[in-house]
Amino acid sequence: MSGLPVRPPELLTPWLNTELPWQQDIFEHLSSLERQEKLPHALLLTGSKGLGKARLAASFAAGVLCKASDAEPCGSCEACQLVGGGAHGDFRWVRPEEGKRAIGVDAIRASVSFMQQTPGYGSHKILVVEPAEAMTTAAANALLKTLEEPPGQALLILVSHRAGELPATIRSRCQRFNLPHPTKPTALKWLVDNTSCSAQTAEQAYALSRAQPLTAERLIQGDDLPSIEALTNALGGLLDKTIANQEVLVALGGHDLDVILEAALHSVEQRLYSAAGAAYSRSNFHRRDQILDWLIASRKGVNFGRDVMLPELGRLLTTE
Ligand SMILES: [Zn+2]
């Protein structure tokens, strides 16, 4: 059904999400604002991918709705049970529909009218938009009216890892909280504790995920480490001219285009930022910008065919 918001299933038990150690300070700060009734109507949670911004949004929203707790959701009261069942009438989560990249105007219009209704259970109507930069221009404009004149009970939480792509008019009406990266030892300890993996696996996943702890967690739990490593090696081989184009294109076959582009970006950036002497190349700046353009276009809903994109990427990585 078009336009209906989709709740990400992994967030249905948000009280399990509160253990991310690097989020404790922001969580406590937000909770203290709420206790003092100083919570702004619109929050913008920013930071790199894989830091747990959506988990923070889910936990905090559930905590606000929870009847039993001032901060972290209890997980057992009526409100928490409804949130857990995806059925809380004052809580709505909007993300791109299955198989789509953009959040369209219909989903936002429906959410705007949801926000204007009187809360049925408690004191807040909560809307999470994730990722907020996926909104089309029309969708962002539809949301803007609510941001300009928020209903008294409204709490809007925008989650974004590319906040620069949001219209300035949206950004300026939100209070922004930028999630910090954990230190490497904190992230590695969390990975080992959380997935029971070995220290070596944690280290490998952390490197492959570009220091994004939740991405690393998914790699470990999804048994994707070997194939992602093969992908990274293939792209690196192209850049370093140690392998030929054809072999690499075969190796890329099983991955989503987005995953391939992210991995290519990582490989290019590694060479840019560790640039010393011969590894330094103006071409890599061009490559980084081009891949970013593709990624942004792809997230805005442009559908690149694999047949077009993979040879194009191969050329970009191998041509000076
Ligand atoms: Zn509760």
Image (cartoon, rainbow, N blue to C red):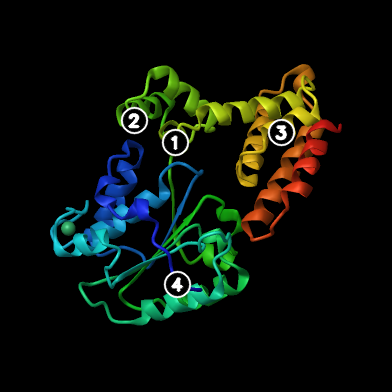
Q: Amino acid at mark 1?
A: Gly
Check if mark 2's residue and mark 3's residue have beta carbons within 8 Å: no
Q: Classify residue 294 as left or right of residue 104.
A: right
* Element class at badge 3: helix
Q: Nearer the viewer, mark 3 or mark 1?
A: 3
Q: Is residue 170 visible?
A: yes
* Element class at badge 4: loop
Q: Amino acid at mark 3?
A: Val
Q: Nearer the viewer, mark 2 or mark 1?
A: 1
Q: Is residue 271 visible?
A: no
> Mark 4 or mark 3, which has the lower sequence index?
4
C-alpha separation, residue under disc 4 versus residue under disc 3: 38 Å
> Mark 2 or mark 1, which has the lower sequence index?
2
What's the mark number on residue 250?
3
Task: Indicate which quadrant contains ligand 1.
Answer: bottom left
Q: Classify residue 284 as left or right of residue 171.
A: right
> Mark 2 or mark 4, which has the lower sequence index?
4
Tell me if mark 3 has few (under 14), some (14-19) or many (20+) residues whose alpha carbon lies within 10 angstroms of its own: few
What's the mark number on residue 195?
2
Tell me if mark 4 has few (under 14), some (14-19) or many (20+) residues whose alpha carbon lies within 10 angstroms of its own: some
What residue does disc 1 label?
222
C-alpha separation, residue under disc 2 versus residue under disc 3: 31 Å
Check if mark 2's residue and mark 4's residue have beta carbons within 8 Å: no
Residue 46: horizontal and vertical position, in percent?
48, 50
> Mark 4 or mark 1, which has the lower sequence index?
4
C-alpha separation, residue under disc 3 versus residue under disc 1: 22 Å
